[in-house]
Amino acid sequence: MNKPNIINILVVFLAVFLVACSKDDEGTTDLTKPTAQIELLNESGVFLAGSSIVINGKFMDDIALKACEITVDSKRNLKGFDVDWNYDEDEIKLSGKEFLVEKRQILPVIPVDIYYGDYELTFKVIDQSDNYTYYKFDITIQ
């Protein structure tokens, strides 16, 4: 190889290296997890089959909120019918730096043909940078 080709290759390599090593968005990478204050309106956490779960919530992030994903999983010390209540996912769309939810029904009405007993209700609060925080509540279905 002659010298001009080697110099051109080195210049291209150096340019690629400098671009790859530069700061993301001039130092504005969001690493802060969102926060929330979530309240079940039924403070006892005991719900009857056929009823609804209603919440109040305040969701916060330093840059921008995205969503709150809600899931229910059984704790398997259950009695009753032969099906767990494992609802895949409900979602509350969030926006802005602060988002308030008042008297919001989450998930569908609790089915009557499920195992009764203890469940875990999980809220996954996500911001626009996909940082997330989990909030978990133990509930009982009777």
Image (cartoon, rainbow, N blue to C red):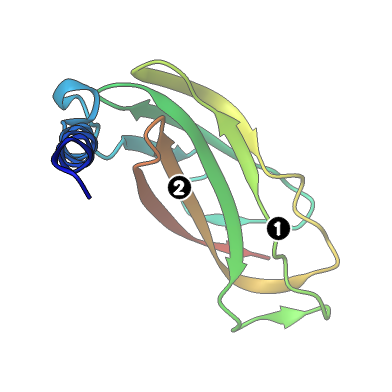
Q: Amino acid at mark 1?
A: Tyr
Q: Residues within 10 Å of mark 2 (few under 14, many from 20)?
A: some
Q: Residue at x 20, y 24 (%)?
A: 28
Q: From the viewer's perspective, is 16 left or right of 111?
A: left
The image quadrant that residue 53 belongs to is: top right
The image quadrant that residue 29 belongs to is: top left
The image quadrant that residue 114 belongs to is: bottom right
Q: Residue at x 50, y 33 (%)?
A: 67
Secondary structure of the residue carrying numbered label 2: strand
Q: Are marks 1 and 2 in contact (CB under 8 Å)?
A: no
Q: Nearer the viewer, residue 127 or 123?
A: 127
Q: From the viewer's perspective, is 135 left or right of 31?
A: right
Is 26 located above or below residue 8 in the figure? above
Percent across and percent down for residue 56 are 47, 30
Percent across and percent down for residue 18 are 15, 34
Q: From the viewer's perspective, is 122 left or right of 27?
A: right
Is 141 located above or below residue 47 in the figure? below
Spatial CA distance of label 1 from label 2 is 14 Å
Badge 2 is on which residue?
124
Q: Nearer the viewer, residue 121 or 41?
A: 121
Q: Residues within 10 Å of mark 1 (few under 14, many from 20)?
A: some
Percent across and percent down for residue 69 are 54, 44
Q: Amino acid at mark 2?
A: Lys
Badge 1 is on which residue?
87
